[in-house]
Every structure is written in C-alpha cells, then in structure tokens.
C-alpha cells in the first residue's frame, strides 16, 4: 500500500509539521508500508528526492518517479494548522474517496476553533476558563473583556498552535500589543482567564476494536508558560506518567475520552488540561498532535510499552475498511 504523508501546510507550524512527517515516515516504513513524504505549501505540493522536488498531482494523488507513476492508496495527514487541521484537506480527501488517519471535516473544523470548542464542551458540564473572542475587523470593549477574564490572562490566536502569537498578560496596558501580535497569526483572537495549576496532557486513539488512552504527561515549563521554546527547545520537563493523585489521573483520562467522543474525533489526538486543586479544566484539543522527536504523544506511546509503528498501523487498519 502506498501512503502519502501530507506535511507542511500554510501556518507558522510548517517546519514542525515536516519534522513530524519525517518521524512518521520512519515508523510507517518500520510497520511495512511504502510511504512518501509530500510537502505542501499553498498550491505547491511536491515529493523530495534528494535535492530534487518532484511535483505531486493533488488531483489524483500521484507523482512520477522516473518512468513509474506512483498513485496513493492512503493519506496520513500530519499538517498542523491550515489546511490540514481545520477540515479543508479532509474535504479534499473525502471527495477523492481516499482514506485517511484523522478526524473528519466537521470535527476538524469545530475543534480547530478554540472558542467554538470551549463553548460546545460547556454544555456537557466540562469546565474551561472564561474567554472572550475579538475580531480584527470589529471594535471591542477592553474594559468589558478585562472585567470578565481578569488578569493575568492569555491572549492567543483563536486558530493556531505551538504557542505562536501567544502572550501571558499581567498588565492592562500590555493587552493591545498582545492582541495585535496574535492578529498576525489569525484574524480572530481569544482572550482567556489564567487558571493557575498543573498542566497535564493526554494522548489517545479509538478504533472499532478498542480505545487506547495513553498515560498522562505533566508539563513543567521553565518559562512563564508552555511557550514555543519550552515545547521545542528543551525549556520544559515532561513527566510521563504524570506523578499526580490516582483519582485525579483517572478523572483526566475519562474526561479526555469523553471529549474525544463529544467532538467526534478519529485517529490519534491529544487533550490538554489544567488541574487546580481537585478541579480539571479543559484547555485545548489537538486533532493533529505533533509527532516529532520532541513531541509528547510518542513519549506516551513508549511509556505505555508500545511502539509508534504498531499504533500507526492500527490506525490505518481501522480507517481502511
């Protein structure tokens, strides 16, 4: 079976996605599949062969390798941000009837929007920090926002990841600059109350045969919050399994499973939480979690005593039928 690993994308996370794609290719090869890393940016899709960039035909998902045309049987989407995490690519794959590894159009479009996801999950009794949404082309009332969310608060792109454009604000006079920074990533910005507590994250996947809820990881950042540098440049400690109370751990695992079902996820996802006292607050849902050497989900898979190649193979087998 020929598998296209779709990586890159049009967001600031382009290079992080490529790193994930490189690791995924190793694991897919280990699992016995033939895989091809397809780099995507805008209308440019190509497979790299040494220094050569071979154009990839997105109309029929094929490319020419010498005299041979290689046509894909399956797509492994590892694009963070648009078009891979927001449902656009999923729609393209659905129209071509090409099976793929991740959540579908509706789930991806909804969960990529942080504000919509928070609002939707509240109806199920899931706690999440107070938040306000501001739009780049509409006026907003800073005083009313501060009255609701308070200080400190987090200001971040409503649709984005890897902490690009994210600021922890402790002073009211720094709000506007932080909002403008976030607007560079997305025309919608979410302003969220700061919930002081322990940050944990849970990777999981479900197939028709079973659910795999990976061990919790606690993130202890050496910076003021879990910044890009903390995530990818070693400025955090990631403890797997998290050293927290057993009942709290079970609560987080169950909540992650419930959120997966509520949002109609498929494949491997990661759910982030803040624990304050005995309360668990939903933070974010990542339907295309990082799979690079620095990423958390591969750590959790290994902590569970499993191999990444076996987990990826199980996802593919489940989504092929």
Image (tube, rainbow, N blue to C red):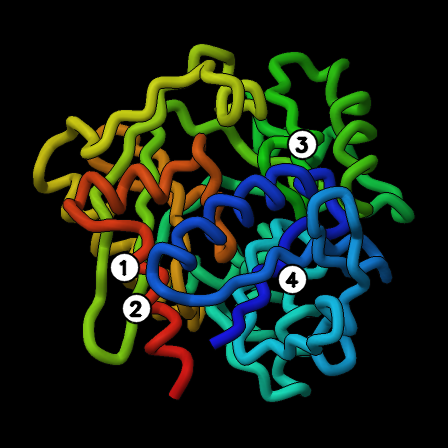
For label 3, the residue is 164
How far is disc 3 from disc 2 in space, using C-alphas? 32 Å
Residue occupying the point 14% across, 47% down: 250
Q: Give coordinates of residue 230: x percent, y percent.
A: 50, 20
Q: Which residue in the rendered view is the most extreme toward the left?
A: 246
**Does the CB distance between marks 4 and 1 fall below 8 Å?**
no
**Tag shown at residue 310:** 1
How far is disc 3 from disc 1 in space, using C-alphas? 32 Å
Q: Give coordinates of residue 16: x percent, y percent.
A: 60, 38
Instruction: Please state which of residues 52 and 196 is positioned toward the viewer in this rendering.
Output: 52
Q: Quadrant of residue 86?
A: bottom right
**Tag shown at residue 52:** none
How far is disc 4 from disc 3 in space, using C-alphas? 17 Å
Circle 2 SS class: helix
Evaluate whether residue 116 shows in this view: no
For label 4, the residue is 86
Q: Which of disc 1 and disc 3 is earlier in sequence? A: 3
Q: Quadrant of residue 30?
A: bottom left
**Does the CB distance between marks 3 and 2 fall below 8 Å?**
no
Residue occupying the point 19% across, 34% down: 241
Q: Give coordinates of residue 216: x percent, y percent.
A: 24, 40
**Tag shown at residue 314:** 2
**Does the CB distance between marks 1 and 2 fall below 8 Å?**
yes
**Does the CB distance between marks 4 and 3 fall below 8 Å?**
no
Foreground mark, 4 or 1?
1
For residue 134, above or below residue 319 = above
Q: Which of disc 2 and disc 3 is earlier in sequence? A: 3
Q: Which of disc 4 and disc 2 is earlier in sequence? A: 4
How far is disc 4 from disc 1 in space, using C-alphas? 27 Å
Residue 285 horizontal side relative to residue 31, left or right: right
Q: Which of disc 1 and disc 4 is earlier in sequence? A: 4
How many numbered badges does the structure rendering display?
Answer: 4
């Amino acid at each position: 079976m020929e598998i296209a690993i779709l990586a890159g994308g049009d967001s600031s996370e382009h290079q992080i996605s490529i790193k994930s794609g490189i690791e995924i290719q190793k694991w897919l090869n280990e699992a016995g599949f033939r895989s091809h890393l397809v780099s995507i940016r805008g209308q440019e899709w190509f497979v790299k062969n040494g220094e050569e960039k071979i154009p990839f035909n997105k109309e029929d998902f094929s490319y020419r390798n010498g005299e041979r045309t290689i046509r894909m049987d399956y797509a492994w989407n590892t694009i963070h941000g648009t078009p891979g995490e927001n449902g656009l690519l999923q729609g393209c794959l659905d129209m071509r009837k090409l099976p793929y590894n991740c959540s579908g159009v509706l789930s991806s479009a909804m969960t990529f929007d942080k504000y919509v996801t928070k609002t939707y999950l509240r109806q199920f009794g899931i706690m999440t920090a107070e938040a306000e949404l501001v739009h780049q082309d509409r006026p907003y009332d800073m005083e009313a926002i501060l009255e609701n969310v308070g200080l400190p608060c987090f200001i971040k792109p409503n649709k984005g990841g890897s902490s690009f454009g994210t600021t922890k604000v402790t002073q009211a006079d720094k709000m506007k600059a932080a909002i403008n920074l976030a607007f560079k990533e997305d025309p919608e910005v979410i302003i969220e109350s700061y919930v002081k507590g322990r940050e944990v994250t849970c990777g999981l996947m479900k197939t028709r045969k079973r659910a795999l809820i990976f061990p919790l990881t606690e993130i202890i950042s050496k910076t003021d919050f879990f910044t890009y540098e903390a995530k990818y440049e070693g400025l955090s400690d990631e403890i797997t399994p998290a050293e927290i109370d057993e009942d709290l751990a079970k609560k987080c695992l169950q909540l992650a499973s419930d959120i997966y079902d509520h949002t109609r996820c498929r494949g491997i996802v990661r759910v982030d939480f803040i624990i304050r006292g005995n309360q668990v607050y939903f933070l974010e849902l990542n339907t295309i979690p990082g799979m690079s050497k620095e990423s958390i989900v591969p750590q959790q898979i290994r902590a569970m005593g499993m191999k990444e190649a076996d987990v990826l193979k199980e996802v593919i087998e489940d989504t092929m039928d």
